[in-house]
Amino acid sequence: MRAGAVDPAAEADEKWLARCIDELIDNALKFSPSGAQVRVTSGPVDLDGVAGVEIAVEDDGPGMPPEQVAGLRSEWAQGDSSDTRRHGGPGLGLALVQRVAEHHGGRLVIGGVGGRGSRVAIVLPALGSVPAEARIGEAVPLPP
């Protein structure tokens, strides 16, 4: 980004966006080794040809193979569903984050390379890049 440039803004429900960021940070901490760093970044991105804003959380955990990433978008999904898994939780977090992102006209982007950590991001349309009715709609309702 050029000097003096300002990151674009996005319009979002503050409560739900905060809950999503909290979920992403919680997952990053849960799956990272003790003492590892978790990084939260934001910045401009291209969202299907329109200006977007990305909020990303990166960790130094074990990473995820591509076949594991695909299943994490479903409700009740766990990366490790075995009886001996080390990390608890019902497997609803990323499904909720995805639903909130889609409700706002955006998406959830999950990336991981086995053994190198993970990067999970919420990408939302930048303010003014698409009409409000196209950005926030009834197609993907949020839970109460």
Image (tube, helix red, strand yellow):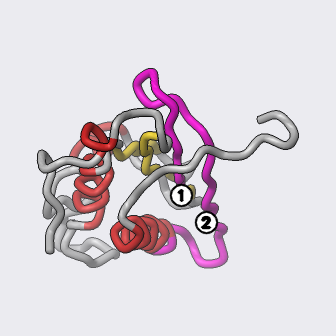
Q: Amino acid at mark 1?
A: Val
Viewer-proximal residue among 86 and 144: 144
Q: Quadrant of the C terminus?
A: bottom left
Quick check: can you spot residue 120?
no
Q: Quadrant of residue 67?
A: top left
- Image coordinates for residue 73, horizontal then vertical, percent: 23, 50
- x, y percentage for residue 105? 31, 42
Mark 2 falls on what kind of element? loop
Whether tag 2 and tag 1 are in contact, CB under 8 A, the answer is: yes
The vertical placement of 98 against 135, above or below, is below
Instruction: Name the amino acid, label 2.
Output: Val
* Vertical arrangement, residue 46 with respect to residue 9, above or below: above
The local secondary structure at tag 1 comes to strand
Q: Nearer the viewer, residue 143 or 90?
A: 143
Point 82% across, 34% down: residue: 2
The disc, 2 or 1, on the residue closer to the chain's N-terminal end is 2
21 relative position to 82: left or right: right
Q: Does 38 appear in magenta?
A: yes
Vertical placement of residue 48 versus 41, above or below: above
Q: What residue is shown with label 2?
A: 38
Q: Residue at x 40, y 65 (%)?
A: 17
Q: Position of residue 5 (x, y in %)?
A: 78, 41
Q: Which residues are magenta?
A: 29-57
Q: Residue 37 lies in what quarter of the image? A: bottom right
Q: How many marks?
A: 2
Closest to the camera, between mark 2 and mark 1, is: 1
- Farthest-out residue, top: 49
State the residue position of label 1. 57
Left or right, 82 with reference to 15: left
Q: Which mark is residue 21?
A: none
Q: Residue at x 26, y 37 (%)?
A: 134
